[in-house]
Amino acid sequence: METMIPFERALEIVLENAVLTGSQRISWQDSLYRILAEGIFSDMDMPPFDKSAVDGFACRKEDLHDTPLRITGTLPAGTPPTHSVQPGECIRIMTGAMVPKGADCVIMVELTEPAGEEKIRFTGTKTETNICYKGENIKTGEQVLEKGTRLLPPQIAVLASTGAVEPLVAKLPRVAVLSTGDELVEPWQKPSDARIRNSNSSQLMAQLATVPVRADYLGIAPDQEAALLTLLDLAFRDHDGVLLTGGVSMGDFDLVPGILEQAGVKILFKSVAIQPGRPTLFGTRGSRFVFGLPGNPVSSLVLFEMLVKPFLLRMMGHDLPSPSFTFTMGKTFHRKPSSRKTMIPVKVAGYQVFPVEYHGSAHINAYTLADGILTIAPGVTEIQTGELVNVRLL
């Protein structure tokens, strides 16, 4: 029996062996989900001028409760003021327009009423300035995004607003996906006799697309040493690493660990104290990597999320923040074997989570109903209703 290592140690080993992919400049329009390889600094103040936060009238606060204010012009956004605000005057102004000199506030249209031709009266008792001041959000030269940031829609907006139209980002890892097993057929084939469709590769390709990486599916390798060695050679030649599914446990036909060693892979672990997913393998060949994931689809799904995805992001210089959130258990949960860290699918309802009906690591349908993964620590046999739990949202 292989010695199992704790999941926490497996994650440490994986992250310690992540080799950076290098960097490239790309268009900010193509940079969604990419990882910054440089810090981004603003080339201007934001806002670049004092601008109105509302539609209204630019005026002086000290004039508000005196006589009606005379309107001396209109300022749409994008048009610079041509004159300043004088005592007893105001300028009609639109949201986003530059506040003219002499004005120290903008009163909202809703707090005014007509007071004769081209005149208005303030009907409120007080007003905010309603001015966004120059540089109050960002100052010229200020760092707005750190190296290692994953670019999501708000970060794309920041790139655009600071003129960073060719950001330096990490290159995408190149990953080969390979399934093993004489029992597998492709999804478009109808299985006969004791065969099953290969769902793991489709699942992994979809998960890789969410990271994202450059992924290639190389097919199904039969349980034959020569065929598997040939496919591994091809995979290592053109890719940074390989994701294998199946063939990594203790059966007579589980050839992967031995063949990987023949292929020059240094295996760093091949058994993790986790359920599902105990027969999970990780190794390196120079700067290349290989993960051997279990053949059951739930094991493959969960171990990708917990080990492979953090590793791939680390290769691009990004450390995945803890994706766990605290909820209360909506229903008491029991289990008998408790020696390993265990993950079960759960449904989120408000601030509570409820276990989804789940029949084990082959029951991938359970995860189509799940919102997250509940982690149960070793030794815990019961979680009571109302108890706080940590859930990794999917």
Image: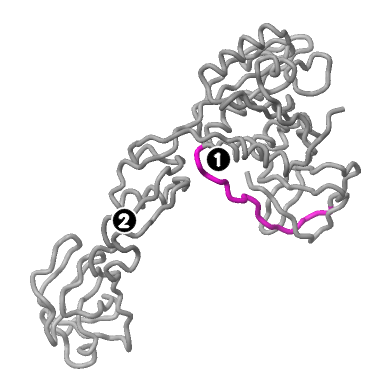
Q: CA distance from mark 2 to mark 1?
A: 26 Å
Q: To which residue does mark 1 refer?
A: 314
Residue 153 on the magenta span: no
Residues rendered magenta in the picture: 316-332
Residue type beneath disc 1: Arg
User: Mark 1: which secondary structure?
Assistant: helix
| Kind of element beneath mark 2 | loop
Please provide percent x and percent y for residue 180. Answer: 69, 16
Position of residue 277 measured from the top left corner of the image (x, y, whole percent): 76, 33
When the figure is inspected, residue 90 is found, relative to residue 299, above or below; the finding is below
| For the residues bearing labels 2 and 1, Cβ distance under 8 angstroms | no
Visual colour scheme: one colour
Residue 27 to residue 146: above or below:
above
On the picture, is 187 further left or further right than 146? right
- The quarter of the rendered structure image containing the C terminus is top right
Image-based side of 39 in relation to 214, left or right: left
Which quadrant of the figure contains the N terminus?
A: top right
Assign the magenta stretch its main secondary structure: loop
Residue at horizontal 83 percent and vertical 42 percent from the top: 340
- Neighbours of disc 2 within 10 Å: few (<14), some (14-19), many (20+): many
Numbered tag placed on residue 42 in the rendering: 2
Where residue 224 sits in the image (x, y, percent)?
A: 72, 8
Mark 2 or mark 1: which comes first in sequence? 2
Q: Quadrant of residue 89?
A: bottom left
Q: Residue furthest right?
A: 336
In the rendered structure, does residue 324 fall within the stretch colored magenta? Answer: yes
